[in-house]
Image (cartoon, grey):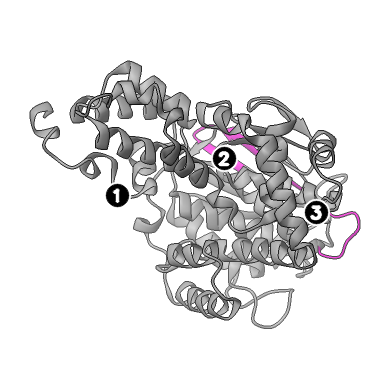
Amino acid sequence: MRLLGRQWPLATFVGRTPDALDERLGPDEATRWATLRWILDLTGLGGIVVVDALAFATGWDSTLLHLFLQALAERQGRAGGGERWLSRWRQERQFTAAVEDTVLRPLGSSRVARIAFWAALAAAPAGEEVTANELLAAAQLTADLVPDAEVLTAAMAGLGRLRLTEQASAERVRLRRCGVLALLGERAEQRLETALRDWAAHSEAAAHEDHGHAVRLWESRRHGLSHDYDEYLAALEGAAPAADLDARLARLAQQTAESSVDERSVAGTTDLVPMLRETIGLWQQAFPGVQVETGGPGAAVARISARAAQVLLYELLANAGEELTGSEAGRVSVHVEPYGDEWLVDVRDNGAGITYPQGREDLVFRAGRSTKGEGRGDGLHRARDIAEAADGALLLASRADGHPILKGAHFRLILAKG
């Protein structure tokens, strides 16, 4: 295998995309390390030292790891290539520019999200917690004109969509300690100043543009199992015209409505914790006035594909967010806990609860039935189908008054451990 592996293209082992690499490595960090070690051994790219260096540099972000592996393979055999290059990658300007672009790409064209990112790195080194006040102070010390505090803290919560984020909310954020963020941290103050200057030059349209991008990104998540989902994301991050994006989103919605859930679309394993963090980060930007609290273990690997888990969490949180839109005291709680061989994901809110008659709670999962108006009602029906296809379940644990504070609906998602 070692003899053959060195003759095959790198894509044979790591896939052609970061998502393919992520799927091959798996959600558990120990398994990822062992699998990456086999890949490097079979391709002749290095041993344990290189694995450790790659893991630290990339923080296990599959997009960054895919980029580093490609660069390592391209330079293998050259003078100063291979392991020697890996120890000096920070000195290669073109590659570090590609690294910075890769890290920021999930933030799309949002100027405020980039300000929040650079302000977080300027306020404290990656790995340390940054509070909202510290992030705001870092921005205010850099420029006279900065986004409103509410807008900036909502963008701060939106940093959860980055894989290098360990924690993100409107109150605090902590980025993962890794080599890439250590490098970007050295440039943070300069980049923050540039980002604020760019935002100020477009300040009149910036707030509307950023919110619109966040809402589009959030609303598209329910279509994660549709064929053209990745194509839509690429168009969105490429700042395609609104009319084109609307047409693409309509096609996605049609695909979602016409497609059926099968075992292939839900097959896989996913760590629910980073997926939930990313989902909540986007959710808070789409519903900035609603407070959310989360709880659970450091990892929760479930037997379900990442895209299927994304759609499930979207439907549950969208249901709560729409219920609380306009409320000045809206609150949502999301908790993950183990129960035997399963994971329980409990989503509660303090809305009005489910208004179907007592004993007819099953209606909430019926296609075409909704308390939110005509043309709604397929989201929770589809979510239950996805959960059941993954050998799990989605239940209405309480229609109302099931919690002393969060007196609204209580949904429980049950998924098998991976």
Q: Secondary structure at mark 1?
A: loop
- The earlier-in-sequence mark between 2 and 3 is 3
Mark 2 vs 1, N-terminal side: 1
Q: Which residue is mark 2?
A: 274
Span colored in magenta: 325-344
Q: Residue furthest right?
A: 328
Q: Main secondary structure of the magenta part?
A: strand
Residue at mark 1 to residue at mark 3: CA–CA distance: 37 Å
Find disc 1 in the rendering and name its residue: 16
Q: Tell which circle, 1 or 3, labels the residue nearer the N-terminal end.
A: 1
Residue 146 pos. (x, y %): 82, 50
What residue appears at the point 19 percent right and 26 percent down from the top-left corner?
44
The kind of residue tagged 3 is Val
Q: Is residue 142 left or right of residue 283?
A: right
Residue, x 73% and y 79% (percent of image)?
Answer: 373
Q: Which mark is residue 151?
A: 3
Numbered mark located on residue 261 in the image: none
The location of residue 219, given as percent across then percent down, is: 61, 66
Question: Dot 3: what SS?
Answer: helix
Position in image of residue 379 (x %, y %): 59, 67
